[in-house]
Amino acid sequence: MAGTALRGRLTWQVATVAALTRETASVCTIGLEPPDWPGHRAGQHLDVRLTAEDGYRAERSYSIASAPGEQLAITVERLDDGEVSPYLTEELQVGDELELRGPIGGYFVWDPGDGSPLTLLAGGSGIVPLRSILRYRVRTGSDVPARLLYSARTLPDVIYRDELGHHHDGVEVSYTLTRSQPPGWTGHTGRIDAGLLAGAAWPAAANPVAYVCGPTSFVETAAAGLVDLGYPPERVKTERFGATGGP
Amino acid sequence: MSPISRGFRGRGRIPAGEAGRLPPGQYLTGGFPVLSAGPTPHTPLADWTFSITRSGATEGSWTWPEFQALPAENVTVDIHCVTRWSKFDTGWRGVSVDTLLDRVEHDGRYMMAFCDGGYTTNLPLDDVTGGKAWVAFDYDGQALAAEHGGPARLLVPHLYFWKSAKWVRGLDLRDRDEPGFWETYGYHMYGDPWREQRYAGD
């Protein structure tokens, strides 16, 4: 089994916020410079800890948005009823200190040595760990063919839109917009279903591996749909919100 | 010494009387988030069995109707997920692991829970006996939904909730403590929320 090595203790460290990039109205990418980052694998996450003046603390996990070897970055969606995400997306400034530890998670990861075609299914900010995988694929010169289906509410809600538009050479990106579509929209509409999946995912006969990340309802539908298409369950790796992106 | 997060006040504080119920690093939620590594399995009840095994050899096994005929208990407990949500006063109905173990010959100090979908998790036997663990099939008065582990999941509320294995199909008794699924990927072997044992080395 891959990733069986147990790590030593994950210690908290104080990173410096090196960059802030507004991705959408509610989503921000935070570039981080930790003093001692051990490196990560594409698809992993990290823990962030905030401390109020009176010592009150709050911790959350966030998917890592950057590829291994790049400047560490997380992408955070503001949740209106959230405690940590409004701070990270609205209060945090370049130069601030941010406490973190990681990387965490050894299952929802992709290694370039795996030559299987990639089926990537993203719901909303579930694109974040898949973006790390796609960037790592480019960075390592992998020629593994990849298909990404990204479900978002509206076009302005699509994270990394420009970047995803620049992927070619074996990467096919398709979108479905569930709430509203701009005039002239030629992509898919509505929530994912069997028909959409059948067209957007590699056929099971190609021996693909799937990474599915998004809200629970999206992941349940998408993962079950892939199994119905003949994907062995162990070839469908899932990550659900609440797992790493809780409020 | 943690740096002060300038401008962070914290909205997750809970009333002082309740604070002792929330383990360190957790926040209270009213929802019931889902965490699974793969697709949700759907095993027909006609094919479902629950087994107690010893190093792989079956010591006892129950079909769904046999399992339903065992004495069951209602339990109300607080649950704590390693991803930091906690939920208070969750109501379950299930069969105590004591009830199951009382009906088979058994020894071994540890056990591995095994599940549909290939998920496993390891627990010391002392942590699932003495009224501390159940195989639960109802949640909040309803049949347990598949995405939450139905038809039946382990319920071990004093440990992080990944130890409460979904879609559980049996317990394998062992002499040695060996890592299960998440434990293999760097999560803690024991997982006590009050000692914040999230990851290996915590």
Image: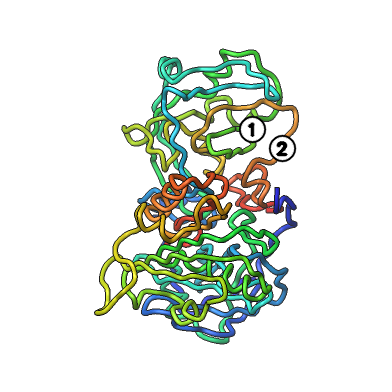
Subunit bearing disc 1: B
Subunit bearing disc 2: B
Residue B192 on image: x %, y %: 60, 44
Above or below — where is B140 with respect to A112? above
Residue at 64% of width from left, 55% of height from top? A106
* Dot 2 amino acid type: Glu
Q: Determine which quarter of the picture holds residue A40.
A: bottom right
Residue B47 on image: x %, y %: 46, 24
Task: Find disc 1 in the rendering and name its residue.
Answer: B112
Task: Find disc 2 in the rendering and name its residue.
Answer: B178
* Camera-nearest residue between B143 and A154: A154
* Camera-nearest residue between A187 and B192: A187
* Dot 1 amino acid type: Met
Residue at 68% of width from left, 30% of height from top? B110
Above or below — where is B185 with respect to A49? above
* Camera-nearest residue between A51 and A45: A45
* Camera-nearest residue between B94 and A135: A135
Mark 2 and mark 1: Cα distance apart in space:
8 Å
Answer whether labels 2 and 1 touch (C-beta < 8 Å).
yes
